[in-house]
Image: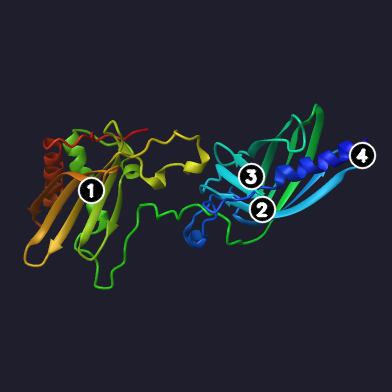
Amino acid sequence: MPARLITRLGVVFAGLFIVVASAADRVDDGARSSAVLHEDAPKPGEWRSKATLQMRMPITQTHVGILSLHDRCAREAMFDLGDGRRLFLTRSKAGEPLTGSRQVRGCASGQTTWTLDVVAPDRLEGQYAGNCDGRQINASVVMQRLGDHAQARWPAATPEAPGKREIHQPDGPAPVSTAELYRQGQAALEHLKGGPIANFGDYAWYDHSRYGAGLMFWVTADGRLRRDNEALPDGCEVDPGTLEPARGLLVVRVENYDGRGRQVLARFTDVETGVIQQAADTDVGDSPAALADGIEEVVGRLREQGASFVLEGAP
């Protein structure tokens, strides 16, 4: 092979891998402890890349740079070697390879396409293929994580997803257990609907404190109950736009107040604005039947006030 082409291929390879983050992109990684990455996502940090150009006499080049992620699913990633150029890698969902394309530096015309599989959170393997002024370029690529780096971008901290949990309070159990609220809440809502709510447990989630317990439901744009986060597939594992977002939040709480007895409260909130659109409350007795009647009353009053939800689940 002519020496001129070998030299140009060496420049091509370096140009593809040498990328840098601007000052705006160099985000402090202090949130890393609370960022929850999908198991199929590479960990941000300092990485070593090794590529072997496939030719009569293989040429291997090794570089050390910074890998950053823009989301926990690793749908968008960037590799940075620090001299002003960037290689962006994308994919639709977890389980797919990361891919990206770049114009070839050092050639009048040419482009390479990169494909990298996430073998482990600290290892990527794959290849790039393309051309330089009509000549085919192929290389195998292995990337290995070396450790943390202050300039590596981590996804924003992921808040704890609401789910079926109980909050322990040292002052004693709540007057109404989540199990009792679940039973009477289901009975009340199904009576209000006039029939069973299939897979009710997939839609309800709750919390529990020393003062009472709450039963909550996400509501879709068309007013149906949306499955609780724990009953949904991981958002990283489905195509973007597949999971319908929640537009509203229906909350039913049962509280005990000193000297006032038991009270049932309900509210319907627009999750995009955080505005409580409808609210109602009523005092109830201590029996399970009284609790069910109180829940049915306040939820019915929300609907009378204009809350737009139907008591059936979305798929």
> Which residue is painted at 50% across and 52% down in the image?
155
Residue 59 tag number: none
3 horizontally vs 14: left or right: right
Among numbered discs 3 and 1, the one appearing first in the sequence: 3
Residue 82 tag number: 2
For label 3, the crowd category at 10 Å Cα-Cα, with few meaning under 14, some 14 to 19 and many 20 or more, is many
**Amino acid found under the numbered disc labelled 3:** Arg
Among numbered discs 4 and 1, the one appearing first in the sequence: 4
Q: Is label 4 in contact with label 2 (beta carbons under 8 Å)?
A: no
Nearest to the eye among marks 2 and 1: give it.
Answer: 2
Among numbered discs 2 and 1, the one appearing first in the sequence: 2
Name, please, the residue furthest toward the bottom: 170
CA gap, disc 2 and disc 3: 9 Å
Which quarter of the rendered picture does the N terminus lie within?
top right
> Which residue is painted at 45% across and 55% down in the image?
157
**Amino acid found under the numbered disc labelled 4:** Ala
Q: Secondary structure at mark 1?
A: strand
**Amino acid found under the numbered disc labelled 2:** Gly
For label 2, the crowd category at 10 Å Cα-Cα, with few meaning under 14, some 14 to 19 and many 20 or more, is some
Q: Position of residue 43 (x, y in %)?
A: 60, 54
Residue carrying label 4:
3
Q: Is label 2 in contact with label 3 (beta carbons under 8 Å)?
A: no
Residue carrying label 3:
86
